[in-house]
Amino acid sequence: MAAPGPCPAVGSEGLYMVNGPPSFTESVAFQRDSGKNCKAVAFSKDGSLFAWCNGEKVNVFNVTRAELLHSFDLPKTVCLEFSPKNNVLATWQAYATAKDGTAGVPNLQLHDLRTGKCLKSFVQKKMQNWCPCWAEDESICARNVNNEVHFFENNNFNTIANKLHLQKVSDFVLSPGAQLTKVAVYVPGSKGAPSFVRLYQYPNFGGPQSALANKSFFKADKVTMLWNKKGIAAVVSQQLHVLPFPLAKNGPIYDVAWSPNSVEFCAVYGFMPAKATVFNLKCDPVFDFGTGPRNAAYYSPHGHILVLAGFGNLRGQMEVWDVKNYKLISKPVASDSTYFAWCPDGEHIVTATCAPRLRVGNGYKIWHYTGSVLHAHEVPADQEMWQVFWQPFLDGVFPERAVRYQAVPGELPRAAPGPAQAYRPPALRNRPATSSKLHEDEPPQNMKPQLGGSDKPVSKTALKNQRKHEAKKAAKQEAKADAPQGPAQVRTPQNALQNTVPAMTTGDPEVDKKIKNLKKKLKAIEQLKEQAAAGKQLEKNQVEKIQKEAALLKELEDLELGV
């Protein structure tokens, strides 16, 4: 099996490459660029070419042969992108008008990497969606220009082969894979009109009736259109539309990720603690990971492992899952991480803390998915790290390996994270802690129909009732285990004694219901009395509940007299 390629790192200490596992030494094949302005960097799709701008020139380096191919005099370049087949390099510089107010020069250049000549220059004022979009075979290239999507064929940028005109079109995505090219376009709503996404088959753009699919929705200022790897299905994420289907929890959608197998995708959604669910192409839930502190999902390149993570304003908790057996592998924590990426070998992960998101504690760690830190690098306190990423490889270079659950040996000892302390207001910090929770954690559950069972997944209500029943059963068993063994007698409250009596019925459902409700209220009063005895300051309404205990007991006794 091939060894993972180098991992370039770029920051105020310059641009350099680190060899992949297991050595982690600086690569001697790539000469370090010590310039302080190496901020624009890019690999080609197959990882054979690498380009960067150091504030003086744009350089193109052949990683395979370890030689410099081209240098372009474009010192102000801030964005770089290779075409899928490495035929064209696209560069973008910030647009600027002349001092006398006349129009600026074209700032988007397309360079032929075989000859080094500039194929075409365009004016592209905005950095958003600056790069043209190619089909995987480079037969089609498209860019958004003033309410139109212009299409070029076979990298001939002097002739517009086709146009798709849509008023206020703001984004588009070409389908990947070997299928005939499809185009998904997004038009934001305005003046009461809904936003919509339309799907076209290139080059059939003859009006709304030519669209293969059309989905409109309100309250969408931005959407994300995600094609699966084969180009046969797309997820449109704002309120999460593939076909309209409900999510199991209200709240925002943090992330949507397609599995590389192209038949499943994972969505992370809902108010914190967020849910994560895997869906199939019919949008049926396949597996629910329950709730947790997470806002991102990352499939391994082979699709056999899924990482659910909580970065940004969360603590960096990660859950690593075997998605073939839906078993939890590890739960490492990468605090203060601003970047995460899988190595193309499907075995290793890099997390990094980079500027400008965080300007202190910059550096990166390389992990094995079993939770071991194999290599860690911290930059000096007076320097910054801006970017870290893996060299990409084509599919099939690294074969899929069996999932392992035992942690591999690491460079750093595995530190078991301490239990998270819940926030307590200052007024309660000197008082006994209570076991109350702000929310009830939901466990993972398999949503696939079980063999020999119902054809449909268990309903949410049935699942909730089942959990309640199991909790009651566990509480009873715990109470029996804690009961004193021997003749010693323990004084028991009156209503607790009543609860030990076998349940009886009056024959009248209404009376039985009243008795049940009264017992509930008495149980709640007993809990309030225990809290008061522990020193907790009760609210006025809670004190009033305790004062009603005698009246409730009398009412309960009257109802049970007829039994």
Image: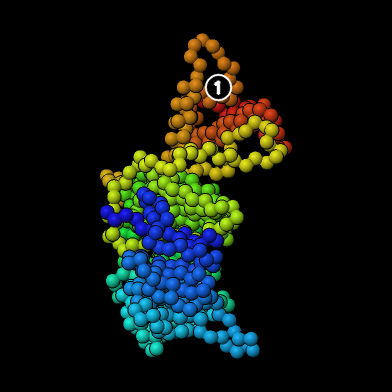
Name the residue beneath numbered marker 1.
Answer: 497
Task: Report the residue at 32% width, 54% height from top.
Answer: 3
Of residues 24 and 426, the one drawn nearer to the viewer in this rendering: 24
Residue 128 spot, x, y in % from top left = 51, 73
Residue 408 lies, with reference to residue 201, above or below; the image says above
Q: Is residue 116 visible?
A: yes
Of residues 307 and 532, the one drawn nearer to the viewer in this rendering: 307
Identity, as a three-letter code, of the amino acid under mark 1: Leu
Q: Is residue 552 visible?
A: no
Task: Report the residue at 45% width, 80% height from top.
Answer: 109
Question: Would you identify the image quadrant in which residue 399 lies?
Answer: bottom left
Question: Would you identify the image quadrant in which residue 233 lies?
Answer: bottom left
Residue 552 lies, with reference to residue 243, above or below; the image says above
Question: Would you identify the image quadrant in which residue 467 lies?
Answer: top left
Task: Report the residue at 59% width, 40% height from top.
Answer: 422
Task: Report the residue at 45% width, 39% height from top.
Answer: 413
Residue 96 spot, x, y in % from top left = 58, 81
Residue 108 spot, x, y in % from top left = 48, 80
